[in-house]
Amino acid sequence: MSRRPTSVDFHFDPMCPFAFHASIWIREVRARTGLDIGWRFFSLEEINRVDGKKHPWERDWSYGWSLMRIGALLRRTDMALLDRWYALIGTELHLRGGKPHDPEVARALLDELGVGAARLDEALADPTTHDDVLADHRRVTEGGGFGVPTLFFADGQKFFGPVLVNPPTGDAAVRLWDLVIGLLEFPNVYEIQRPKGESETADIGAALQPYLAGRDWVSIDRGRVIDLSGMGQLSSPQPATPPA
């Protein structure tokens, strides 16, 4: 491309390890290019909901959905606050193997963020935070999307991915960005995927160990339970629907 985009909307679910690894990469791109990132939501709990289970907005506390409701409240004050919240809860789950989806852990993380644990109760007491998360979620699904990360560009184009672990840093991060945005020139290219053999599966498994230790749910891909213990079924990686 002759000119890089100056902004991108990055839809994420905080429970998704692939979105989190991609968020580390996109922040590196921002640091090196000045890219403006609009953080937006998407619910794997909802997209992978099994018939008969409650919608996430029908539960008193709902893992990723509730964490995003807190993020929605913080975003009303400052996008940078949501940026920091996502980085904090993502680090807790995907790098430390902690449980930010536990309300008490979430309260402690809000204190660490400097906004106070009471923000959790404020977010859950405000029904319009449901509306904010659902609006972002529907933006993806109404555009034909199904997972995270999903990137939206100013010209209306959108990509699912990149799906990655061990994100590149430095100049390599920018080279990957240039490869991704280069596809904007080719709107009829719909999919490209790297087959995963044993070595690739092992790399993914190693990177996901903290997430696997911290999660309290099974993984479901569009209604089908996925066994991540052997990391052999990651052709379309979509983690995490908690129980009703």
Image: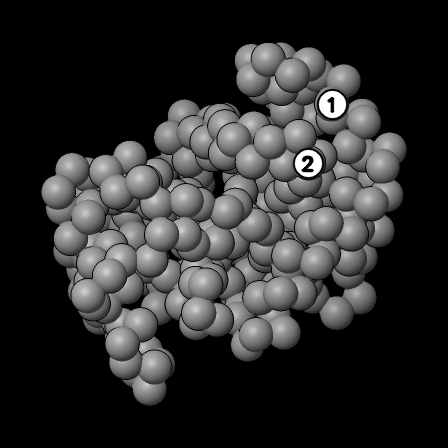
* Amino acid, disc 1: Arg
The image shows residue 82, relative to residue 152, as above or below, that is above
Front residue of this view, candidates 204 and 37: 37
Q: Is residue 3 left or right of residue 226?
A: left
Q: Is residue 157 visible?
A: yes
Q: Which of marks 2 and 1 precedes in the sequence?
A: 2
Image coordinates for residue 48, horizontal then vertical, percent: 62, 64
Image coordinates for residue 231, horizontal then vertical, percent: 33, 55
Q: Which residue is mark 1?
A: 119
Front residue of this view, candidates 175 and 204: 175
Look at 31% across and 40% down and name the residue there: 34
| Residue 8, quarter of picture | bottom left
At label 1, counting other C-alpha atoms closer than 10 Å, the crowd grade (few under 14, some 14-19, many 20 or more) is some
Front residue of this view, candidates 184 and 2: 2
Q: Is residue 118 left or right of residue 85?
A: right
Residue at disc 2, secondary structure: helix
| Residue 116, quarter of picture | top right
